[in-house]
Amino acid sequence: MYYITTAIDYTNGSPHIGHAYEKVLADVLNRYRKQKGEESYLLTGVDQYGQKVQQTAEKEGVDPNTYVTRTTENFTNAWGKLGLAYDGWAETTNPLHKECVQQILQKLYDNGQIYKKHYKGFYSIRQEQFLTDKERNEDGEFGPEWGQVEERDEENYYFKLSDHVEWLREFVESNEDFVIPSFRRADVLNAIERAEDTDLCISRPKERLRWGIELPFDTEFVTYVWFDALINYISFAGYNKAEGSDLPNFEDLWPANLHIIGKDILVPSHSIYWPCMLKAMGFSNEQMPTLLVHGWWNIKSSDGSEKMSKSLGNVIDPVNLVEQFGQDAVRYYLVRDIHTGRDSDYDHERLVMLFNTELANNLGNLCNRALNMTKRYCGGITKEFTYEHESLKALRDSLPGTVESYIQHMDKHNVSFALEGIIKFISSANALIDLHEPFRLAKDPANEDQVNAILSHIVEVVAIASVLLKPVIPEACDRIQAQLMTDKLSGITLADIKWGLIPVGHEVAKPKPVFPRIQLDKAE
C-alpha cells in the first residue's frame, strides 16, 4: 500500500495557506495513486501538546484540552472546505497515541538510549528546544528564527542522538531518494555535521510544563513535543497496536512512501531526530521513510517577497479563499502555480487568472460547447460517423502521450507540470472546434457525418479531462461527469483510459456552467 503523511499542524493557531497547500498536495497525490489502481492511505492530523499550547490556553483562561479541541475544529473545518479525503486522522491527545509513545520511550530507556543529566544553557521559546553554540550566527548571537531565547538550568532526560549520527551520515549519502527534491540533501548533511556529539533533550519537567505525555519511567517529566509528534506517523499507522484495534496493519503501510513536510521542519526534526529515533527503535535502512519537502508560499511586499507570518499580519486564511473563490479555484491554484519543492508568491490575481483561463475559458467552455452542440445538432446523442481528418487523427493520437506524460510527472510529484499537459490536450479540442466550425457546418444537412465526428471527438475529450483532473478538482469533475450522464468514469483507472470512453449512441445532458468566471473588482 502507498502510504502518504503530512506534517501534523500545531494547534496553537489557525490554518493558513501553507497548511492548506501541503494538505491539498497530499490529497491530490493520494487520489492519484488510487486513480492508478493502487491501494493508498493518507494520514494527516494535529499536534496538540507543547508549551505554546499550554501558555495560550492559560492566557485565555481555559483548560489546554478544551483549547485544543476548539482549535482542532478550525483545521477539520478548513480541510472539509477544501474537499480533503484523508484515510486516517491523527490527534496526539488520543490515548492510543499516548500508549504507543510511552511504549517506545520505555523501550529506548531500557535499552540505554535515554539517560538523565543536568544541563545549563539557552532555550528557544518559539522552537521549544535547547540551543548550543552551533546555533549561533556569525555574530555569536541566536538569530531571529529562534524567537525569544532564555537561559535555563535544569535536569532532563536525553536521547542518545550522537550514537546514530555516523550511521545517518552514511545513510543520507548513499540514499539519494531519502530527501526529495535532491538539492535538499545538502541541508541535511550540513545539519548532521552540527548534530555531532549532541544528544536530544526529550523531556520537560512538570513544574514548567504539564501539558504533555508523561515519561513512563519518571512521571515528574513530560515528553518533548517533537519526540511525541513525530511518532504519530507510526502510532496511527498501527505500530504496536493492541489486539482488536481499528488502526491499520502497520506492515501494510510502513515504510512511508512520502512524508510531505515544509522545508522549515526538514532539519533537524524530520531528517535528524526522526531517522535516528527509528534506527534506535530497531528499524532497518530499508524501513526508513522518504521525505518530500515543499517550499513556502510567500507574500509579495513592496521590496520583494517575504514569508507569511502571524507577527507580520500577512497570513492568508484558506477558508476565506474558498468562500470567496470556491473550492475548485483554490485547489487548482495551490498545485498549479507552484513547482513542488520550490517557493512561490501568493497572488490572488493569478488565482483568478488561472481559474478563468485554464478552467472556465478552456475546459468549461469546451464542456459547454460540446454538450450544447450535441443537444442541438445530434439530439443529445453521440452519433456514428465515417468522416476522417488529420486534425481528428492527431487529437486521438495525442492521448497516449498525454496520459504517459501525466503519469510521469505525477509519479515525480510534479503536479503543476502534469496539469500543463492536460490543459494542452483540452486546448487541442477547442482548436478543433475553431478549425472546423461545426456550428456553421450544421446549417447544411450534407455535413451531418462531419458534424457527428467533430462533436463525438470533443465530447470524448471532456470525458477524458474529467478523469485526469479528478485528483485536483474532484467535485468539479463529478459535476462534469453528471452532465455526461455516465457512472462509468467514476471508478476508472489510468490504465483504462483509451479513446472511446463515451460510446456511440450515448446520451448527454444539457450543460450547466461548471466553472463560472470569477469577476474581481479593485476593492476585492
Image (spheres, rainbow, N blue to C red):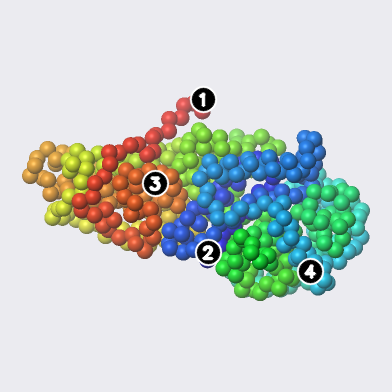
Between residue 348 and residue 364, name the one nearer to us: 364
Give the quarter of the image for residue 305.
top right
Task: Look at label 4 and name its amino acid.
Answer: Leu
**C-alpha distance separating marks 1 and 3:** 33 Å
Residue 182 lies in quadrant:
bottom right
In the image: residue 44, left or right of residue 523:
right
Q: CA distance from mark 1 to mark 2?
A: 45 Å
Q: Amino acid at mark 1?
A: Ala
Where's residue 376, x and y in %? 19, 38
CA neighbours of label 1 inside 10 A, class few (<14), some (14 to 19), many (20+): few
Of circles 1 and 3, the one toward us is 3
Label whose residue precedes the other's in the sequence (4 or 3): 4
Residue denoted by label 2: 2
Q: Secondary structure at mark 2?
A: strand
Q: Nearer the viewer, mark 1 or mark 4?
A: 4
Q: Quadrant of residue 176?
A: bottom right
Q: Earlier in the sequence, mark 1 or mark 3?
A: 3
Find numbered disc 4 in the image and state the secondary structure of the residue it sits on: helix
Q: CA distance from mark 4 to mark 3?
A: 49 Å
Check disc 3 and give the amino acid type. Answer: Asp
Residue at x-position 62% and y-position 43%: 75
Q: Which residue is mark 1?
A: 523
Residue 219 versus residue 84 in the image, above or below: below
Q: Is residue 131 visible?
A: no
**Residue 396 % position (x, y):** 26, 57
Label 3 element class:
helix
- Residue pointed to by mark 4: 108
Any mark on residue 478, and which?
A: 3
Q: For the residues carrying marks 1 and 2, which lies nearer the camera in this image?
A: 2
